[in-house]
Image (tube, helix red, strand yellow):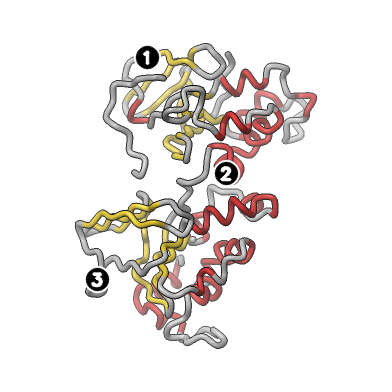
């Protein structure tokens, strides 16, 4: 267990362009001219919003693929709806693949709260100065914070709040809520970790990286090499993937050298060079300087990707034990 002398860690801690402007300015009236079939264009159901607004096309495909349309027709629910741009860091094809149906359902139901939540409008709105947790359809909780200037859910910006639907409320988010997925599943759906996910499976480390580590008390920190880093180090025939013949005999050890049996965010890393043990058995050296974290001298380019069993920090390098 790596014990950094830092403050306690905070764990709880899918309308663009004119459509967004229309959404904000007119609410349900933005859909007056839309063909909503049997629904009332002044007050569509949540499924009506998702299906009729072009900027929700990825969310619509995901809801259909997961068979959750009926859930979004239930009365008295709130949907935190990621717009298309929110899915940019993710691999949509992997996210909606048949093999990932359970994962997709987990992610989407985490965006649904089985009660109406208004942020600013109405007598029962949360109002500025409120921070409150709500249980989701998935079973986990989301943390909503309302200030004078912003609304966030799990720290993700709600860019358009309080859109009334006939059966609930829609809040448009600038990100996808992924706190319930583990490190392996996050690599599975994140475009820049596609090669890493393949290597995790081929080296038999899936179970290890789904767990909380040998110490089993807190979780893991994964320094995750990007696709470019792994291909640069291992793709000798330059065909854009790592063939079985290109996987080093010690690939399992190499990957475990990227994993710490403890959890820390970027801000937790000491400002002095500090050696910490890895699952491989030897140490890496971490340091934070002027807000930048390095591991063995390599800069963390994507910090603080929090997952259910720890945290991922993306790096543009492959660490060799």
Answer left or right for 46 relative to 204.
left
Q: Where is residue 40 in the image (x, y as percent from the top left)?
A: 47, 87
Q: Mark 2 points at which residue?
A: 190
Mark before the other along the chain sequence, 1 or 2: 2
What residue is at 32 percent from the left and 55 percent from the top? 144
Q: Name the residue under label 3.
A: 124
Answer left or right for 249 relative to 268.
right
Do the CB atoms of the residues marked 3 and 2 lie less than 8 Å apart?
no
Quadrant of res 133: bottom left
Q: Where is residue 88 in the image (x, y as percent from the top left)?
A: 53, 52
Q: Is residue 60 above or below residue 265?
A: below
Q: Position of residue 159 (x, y in %)?
A: 37, 61
Q: Name the residue under label 1.
A: 273
Q: Can residue 192 be seen in this view?
A: no
C-alpha span from label 1 to label 2: 30 Å
Classify mark 2: helix, strand or loop: loop
State which mark lies toward you, 1 or 3: 3
Answer left or right for 7 relative to 239.
left
What residue is at 32 percent from the left and 34 percent from the top? 9
Mark before the other along the chain sequence, 1 or 3: 3
What residue is at 73 percent from the left and 31 percent from the top? 242
Classify mark 1: helix, strand or loop: loop
Position of the C terminus, as image quadrant, is top right
């Amino acid at each position: 267990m790596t014990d950094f002398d830092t403050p306690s860690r905070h764990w709880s801690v899918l309308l663009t362009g004119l459509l967004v402007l229309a959404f904000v300015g007119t609410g349900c009236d933005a859909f007056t001219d839309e063909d909503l079939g049997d629904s009332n264009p002044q007050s569509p159901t949540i499924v009506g919003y998702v299906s009729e607004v072009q900027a929700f096309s990825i969310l619509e495909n995901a809801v259909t693929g997961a068979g959750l349309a009926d859930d979004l027709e239930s009365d008295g629910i709130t949907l935190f709806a990621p717009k298309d741009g929110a899915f940019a860091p993710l691999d949509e094809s992997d996210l909606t693949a048949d093999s990932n149906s359970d994962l997709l359902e987990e992610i989407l139901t985490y965006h649904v709260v089985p009660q109406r939540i208004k942020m600013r409008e109405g007598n029962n709105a949360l109002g500025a100065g409120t921070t409150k947790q709500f249980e989701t359809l998935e079973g986990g909780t989301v943390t909503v914070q309302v200030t004078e200037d912003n609304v966030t859910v799990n720290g993700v910006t709600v860019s358009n709040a309080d859109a009334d639907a006939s059966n609930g409320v829609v809040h448009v988010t600038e990100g996808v809520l992924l706190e319930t997925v583990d490190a392996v599943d996050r690599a599975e759906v994140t475009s820049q970790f596609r090669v890493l996910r393949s290597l995790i499976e081929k080296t038999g480390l899936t179970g290890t990286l789904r767990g909380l580590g040998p110490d089993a008390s807190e979780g893991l920190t994964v320094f995750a090499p990007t696709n470019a880093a792994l291909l640069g180090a291992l793709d000798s025939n330059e065909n854009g993937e790592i063939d079985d013949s290109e996987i080093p005999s010690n690939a399992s050890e190499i990957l475990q050298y990227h994993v710490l049996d403890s959890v820390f965010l970027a801000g937790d890393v000491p400002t002095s060079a500090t050696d910490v043990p890895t699952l491989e058995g030897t140490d890496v050296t971490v340091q934070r300087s002027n807000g930048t974290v390095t591991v063995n001298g390599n800069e963390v380019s994507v910090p603080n990707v929090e997952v259910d069993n720890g945290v991922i920090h993306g790096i543009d390098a492959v660490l060799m034990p």
